[in-house]
Amino acid sequence: MARVPLYKLAHARSGDKGDAANCGVIAYRKEWYPLLRDYLTPERVKAYFEGICYGPVERYELPNLWALNFVLHNALGGGGTVSLKLDAQGKTIASAMLMMEIEVPDDVAATL
């Protein structure tokens, strides 16, 4: 197994719903979706965003889109209108998520 940054396998988009950050992660290739699904658990995402996300993390699977959607609760300091955070609308969550390193088989890593 090899560790690679998520951005080699997927792209992402994020935003907000009140105090919850929403982050969609979409695989570049259909065959990479199972790797994302197996590695990007709510627990791993929660641990990765320790100090930012203070509530639970929910994950929704969208296999027909090769995508996962994460909702990080209590992550935006109250939301856009009341938060003192620099990114109160969660726009940078996707960029941060793509920096996460994930484990992939060596043969997949060799193709990146």
Image (tube, rainbow, N blue to C red):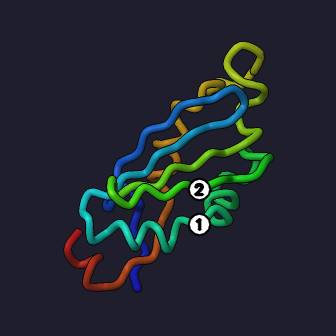
- Asked whether the residues under the numbered discs 1 and 2 touch, taking CB atoms below 8 Å apart as contact, a structural biologist would say yes
Crowding at dot 1, Cα within 10 Å, few <14 / some 14-19 / many 20+, comes out as some
The image quadrant that residue 59 belongs to is bottom right
For the point 25% across and 84% down, which residue is it?
107
User: Which mark lies nearer to you, 1 or 2?
Assistant: 2
Type of amino acid under label 1: Thr
Q: Position of residue 105 (x, y in %)?
A: 35, 84
Q: Position of residue 37 (x, y in %)?
A: 47, 68
For the point 68% across and 65% down, which residue is it?
43
- 110 in relation to 48, above or below: below
Type of amino acid under label 2: Arg
For the point 33% across and 57% down, which residue is it?
64
Q: Position of residue 53 (x, y in %)?
A: 73, 46
**What residue would you read off at disc 1?**
41
Give the farthest residue toward the top.
81
Locate residue 36 relative to residue 112 in the image: left or right.
Answer: right
Locate residue 74 relative to residue 31 in the image: left or right.
Answer: right
Element assignment for label 1: loop
Element assignment for label 2: strand
State the residue in front, 110 or 69.
69
For the point 57% across and 39% down, which residue is it?
22
The image quadrant that residue 89 belongs to is top right
**What residue would you read off at disc 2?**
59
Find the distance from the CA under tag 1 to the CA under tag 2.
8 Å
1 or 2: tag closer to the N-terminus:
1
